[in-house]
Every structure is written in C-alpha cells, then in structure tokens.
Image (cartoon, helix red, strand yellow):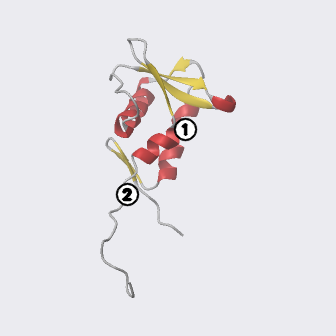
Amino acid sequence: MPSPISVQIGQREFRSMNQARLHYRDVLHRSEPNRPVVEADRMEVMALVKAAALGAPCPADSQVHVVKVSYGRRGFEVRGNEGTMCRVSIMRAVRECAVVPPVSSTPSPGA
C-alpha cells in the first residue's frame, strides 16, 4: 500500500491528499450555489489558489462563489474586481500543493 502524500496549503498541513480534498469538499458543500462563500471559507479557498499557483494571479480581495460546473456538480469560482474569473478544480489544486518526498539517488542492491 502506498504511503500517503502530505499536502501543505498556507499554514495548514494535511496528512494526505485525500484529507485535503475532503476538507475543501466540505467547504464547497457548506455554501449555497451562486452565492459568495463566507469570509472564513473565502480565506481557505484563496490560500488553496495561491498555494497551487493556478493560472493568473488572483487579487487577495477576490470573491469566491460556489457555482454549478460539469455534470451538475458544484465548484469554486474566483471572481476578481476587474471582471476576471477562474474556476478551481479542488483535486488539481491539491495535487499542485502535494509535498513530494525526495527521490533517493542511491542505487538499489543488485543494480
């Protein structure tokens, strides 16, 4: 069984990518579609976006909304004051924040 890959997002550290995914999924489901998320959740999502460096940089004062995305699912949409917006894939962002252990350069026995 593979060992879990830890994830660092801002000041938060998750023991596995699945724990991080579940945390942000819970944030997603706490909010109503087509409404801005509450401030505490907005800060969480913006920390994820910043840590994952997704696309164009988002201003710190951007609004985060929950919107319907493909197949009727919910997703995050970050809306900047200047009319920019980007959709956030939780799994893609979490993968970008994964703390990958360094690969050992020692040769294996018998190699």
Image x and y of residue 76, in percent: 52, 28
Horizontally, residue 53 falls left or right of residue 65, namely left
**Could you say which quadrant of the image residue 56 lies in?**
top left
Q: Residue at x 43, y 58 (%)?
A: 5
Question: Marks 2 and 1: which is nearer the front?
Answer: 2
At label 1, the amino acid type is Asp
Q: Residue at x 34, y 66 (%)?
A: 103
CA–CA distance in space, label 2 to label 1: 25 Å
Q: Residue at x 39, y 88 (%)?
A: 110
Image x and y of residue 35, in percent: 55, 18
Q: Which mark is residue 26?
A: 1
Within-10-Å neighbours for mark 1: few <14, some 14–19, many 20+: few
Q: Which mark is residue 100?
A: 2
**Contact between labelled residues 1 and 2, with CB atoms less than 8 Å apart:** no
Which residue is at the far top?
82
Horizontally, residue 35 falls left or right of residue 100, namely right
Horizontally, residue 33 falls left or right of residue 56, namely right
Which residue is at the far bottom?
110
